[in-house]
Image (tube, rainbow, N blue to C red):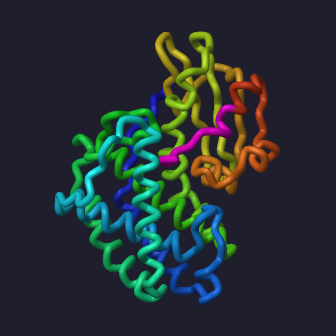
Amino acid sequence: MKPVEPIFTSHLFPLLDEKLLEILRSLSPQDWERQTIAPLWKVKDVAAHLLDGNMRALSMLRDHYFGEKPENIDTYPDLVWYLNRLNADWVNAMQRVSPKVLSELLEITGKEYSMLMNTLNPFEKALFSVAWAGESESENWFHIAREYTEKYHHQQQIRLAVGKEEVLLKKELYFPFLDTSLRALPHHYREVNAEVGDVIQVTISGESGGDWYLYRNEEKWILVTECELVPICHIRIPPEIAWRLFTKGISREEAEPLINIDGEKSYGSRIIDMLAVMA
């Protein structure tokens, strides 16, 4: 039994941004207006949202400037509603900005953002917890990895819309996304009853994937990366589906036929509703 370990992703931000600028600079005017799997956003809107992430992080984490302060945020749905409103306000305002200016701003802020991530002590308390993993307090390494998944899946939304998503499915960039996203498993399964010693195995197929195991101890589910026990359920997810599944990018009806579940089906089917984003 080998528990999961911290994930270090700050060194990957420059490469991820390089891939982003490559795809954005290759787009035609028509490509910028293509619909993405985010129902309300076209390609340009997703790019604008990525810029918002850079600028907000620099403002809050580097400059300690928070601007609008949320009020009456008492529950998880309250927080999601607040974040969705912030996102919509920004994307609407960015309608007046050209794709060229947007790309230039992403290049400038992306470099500053990457530098900022490298200044954070990975084991100090993060300013923001990773709520989708059930944490009320997180260390910086997890916050940074969560930010990596945000940048990854939004770029992948753009790439999927223009038919070039395979670039980010390579192991160097995709495995850290998967390893971070699957930290949501114990929280997602927290209300699922099981016997002590029960194991659920999750496999993301392909060279960029791997195996993760949910193990039930006397108190709760824990996530491990090595386990010799025979699982009561084995879930196999194709790599091209996994990132969409964990980011609300595919419906249950679309995903269910594509996921193979051996053993206890009721345990396996629950993963289809798991999210590693604030939604």
Image coordinates for residue 127, horizontal then vertical, percent: 26, 46
Name the side, left or right, on which 113 lies relative to 169. left
Asked if 156 appears above or below 231 in the picture, the reply is below
Image coordinates for residue 176, horizontal then vertical, percent: 49, 51
Image coordinates for residue 113, horizontal then vertical, percent: 30, 66
**Going 45% across and 37% down the picture, which residue do you hit?**
133
Towards the viewer: 79 or 202: 79
**Going 50% across and 61% down the picture, which residue do you hit?**
152
Name the side, left or right, on which 137 lies relative to 278. left
Asked if 28 appears above or below 133 in the picture, the reply is below
The kind of secondary structure the magenta stretch mainly shows is loop
Towards the viewer: 78 or 167: 78
For the question of whether residue 15 can be seen, the reply is no
User: Is 271 contained in the magenta span?
Assistant: yes
**Going 65% across and 63% down the picture, which residue do you hit?**
37
Image coordinates for residue 168, horizontal then vertical, percent: 57, 65
- Magenta stretch? 270-279
Asked if 30 appears above or below 116 in the picture, the reply is below
Res 61 quadrant in image: bottom left
Number of numbered discs: 0
